[in-house]
Image (spheres, rainbow, N blue to C red):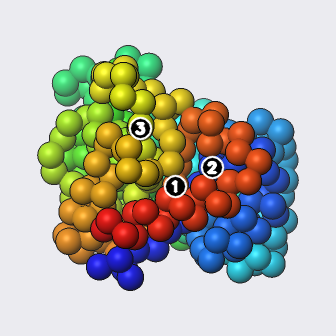
Amino acid sequence: MPSKLTFALNHMVAPGLKPAAFFALCRDLGLSDVEIRNDLSGNAIIDGTPAAAIKAQAAENGMSIATINALQRFNEWSAAREAEAIELADYARDAGAAALVLVPVNDGTGKADGERQRNLRTALTALTAILGDRGVRGLVEPLGFEICSLRSKREAAEAIEDVDGTDTFRMVHDTFHHHLAGEPDIFPGMTGLVHISGVDDPAVTVSDMRDPHRVLVDAADRLDNVGQIRALVSGGYQGLLSFEPFSPVVQKLTEPRAALAESIAFIRSRV
């Protein structure tokens, strides 16, 4: 089973690195897939780096761009959101990115039963044409936080099917958010990407876990990344396992390569 595991890096692993250096880090780890982001201050994409430049730098390092992460508040559809979606989808196409991650509203609004399902279908319907016309896949990422407007992967999967969106959309299985949501089902056949990170703080409660707690996966992991990955692979998932730690402890490492290699080796040895 370990031979089936294919790892990738999300730029959040080392947000201080410029894209070329980030791509080189991935290459040095023997990886070939990356996720770039549009929320890193002073870095691409937010600094105006052209998509063609990102595409060229990725190619120079032998990298495939798996996603742009992300269209935020995607399920709060509006004219402004549509314009943002078109801009990001154009950038993804021109950079050679395969997919755009779709992150739901996460501020306590849009949660009401009925409202959240309706909003989700409205957004997916509109995005079907925008993404489909550009050959970009949409990756819906439910978040496990209690305030989130889309916590359930089952609700996401049902909405994708309801709008006839299975040619355009898949879901992100984030091991952190899956643990927080407490939803047992994993939907490996509807999963297009897996985000992995661990929590090793023994004191924090599950309901109090937040992004800064998210570190690399090791033996102290409380989220059962190993068990989640085993279940996904056993269910037929053969896609990427992309490291997405948000902890400053990881992000400020002067030599992230060694720590990442160690985490990769740990997961391979356990799965």
> Residue farthest to the left?
184
Indicate the quadrant containing the C terminus: top left, top right, bottom left or bottom right: bottom left
Where does label 1 land, which residue?
A: 243
Q: Secondary structure at mark 1?
A: strand
Where does label 3 land, which residue?
A: 199
Q: Is residue 49 left or right of residue 194?
A: right
Q: Is residue 216 left or right of residue 109?
A: right
For the residues labelled 3 and 2, say whether their Cβ atoms are less than 8 Å apart.
no
Amino acid type of the residue tagged 1 in the rendering? Phe
Q: Is residue 79 left or right of residue 19?
A: left
Amino acid type of the residue tagged 3 in the rendering? Val
User: Does residue 125 show up?
Assistant: no
For marks 3 and 1 on the same chain, the one whose residue lies earlier in the sequence: 3
- Residue at the spot 29% in from the left edge and 34% down from the top edge: 180
Quadrant of residue 30 in the image?
A: bottom right
Indicate whether 234 appears above or below 91. Answer: below
Whole-percent x, y for residue 139 in the image: 43, 55
Within 10 Å of the Cα at label 2, are there few (<14), some (14-19), or many (20+) other Cα atoms? many
